[in-house]
Image: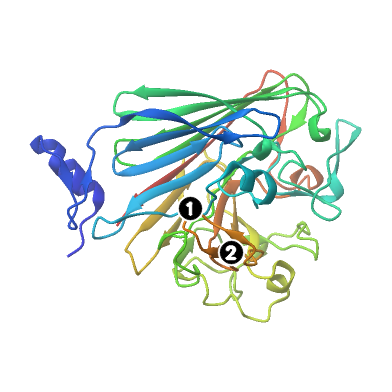
Amino acid sequence: MELNRRTVIAGAAAAGIAATTLGGTAHATGGRTPVKSLFGKLADGTKIYCWSLENGGTRLKVLSYGGIVQSLEIPDRRGRYTNVSLGFDTIEDYVSSSPYFGALIGRYGNRIAKGKFTLDGKAYQLSVNDGDNSLHGGAQGFDKRVWDIEPFTKGSDVGLYLYYTSVDGEMGYPGTLRSKVTYTLTRHGDWRIDYEATTDKATVVNLTSHVYWNLAGESSGTIYDHELSIAAARYTPVDSGLIPTGELAKVAGTPFDFRRTKTVGEDIRVAHQQLLYGKGLDHNWALDKGITARPEHIATLRDPSSGRTLKIATTEPGLQFYSGNFLDGSLVGTGGTVYRQGDGLCLETQHYPDSPNHPSFPSTVLRPGQTYRSTTVHSFSA
């Protein structure tokens, strides 16, 4: 019999004792105050810090560089902990080699065609860093910025406030954007992300998190046997540059149908033009629920070998599912093994790619006096 981790923790808390899992690993019933330590220095001498948090059986390490999740540890069905997010041990690797491992993404998550868009009749040229396109905010996006971080404890929750101000014209974007991102570990061990931003000039914003998940452990091999479901009947097909065509295509009868739970690898080798473009899955699903005021469940990922399960709820209308197609064995991770194709996957909650150039897509425009808000919750169990 397998026990849900929340049941174990809650029962022990009610009894006034330390919680344990079947494997005997102890879980804290209350959050620990976040701990700050030096992770490394940038070439200009800027110190980069690592914040360690623990609550409800989840252990999280966050860097001030890029707001990066350097590791996230959760137990398996026997209570054995492992890091389930891909990453590096040194700041030098994050600066020189990272394919956005664990990073906060902005100003605009995903791609903008040829780095161009027009807003209120004015044309803007963004930093281009993905062939002819702008990807994840450009060459020096939010993933490569140093964030100010403040720890907090609030009731039974612990977390971090992350702040970054992007000046007018940075990477070509208009307006000074003030961003606040809150990472919270709840007493249940959920990892919640709340995004907020304001601007002094009309701009476009699409913030997200780029964690690469492998629920069997970051150095355990491919995620093709992970089981996944996504609550979406449509997706946005792309051209050869991975830019949406503007169509909202039905997933029925295609490799993109995850409405029923299936393994990631079940259809990934099917001879489908969209899979050839992405060298696998690297597409946006148009979530059935659309934009919501509160987070709603949209996806479940499970690793059968460990029993670990990740459930995702969000307020966002889209989910970019990327199956780690461009990992090529050139990067060595925290576990000391090289990362190869399919060794991790991303489930990025966001607005659609290239929305500024598709009026039919949900708008990503933010104007003065408005506040950008978005929330995503990651819930873990075994």
**Which quadrant: the N terminus?**
bottom left
7 horizontally vs 226: left or right: left
Tell me the SS state at disc 2.
loop
Viewer-side residue, 189 vs 72: 72
* Position in image of residue 315 (x %, y %): 52, 41
Against 312, residue 268 (above or below) is below
Q: Which residue is mark 2?
A: 323
User: What is the quadrant of the C terminus in the image?
Assistant: bottom left
Q: Is residue 78 left or right of residue 138?
A: left
Residue drawn at the location 77% of the way across and 30% of the way down: 203
In the orientation shown, which residue stands out farthest toward the left? 15
Label 2 to label 1, Cα distance in Å?
Answer: 14 Å
Residue 82 placement: quadrant = bottom left
Q: Position of residue 6 (x, y in %)?
A: 24, 46
Residue drawn at x 68%, y 81% is 271
Could you say where residue 109 lies in the image, as x and y percent from the top left? 67, 44
**Residue shown at 79% from the left, 30% from the top:** 170
Residue drawn 80% across the image and 35% down it:
171
> Label 1 belongs to which residue?
85
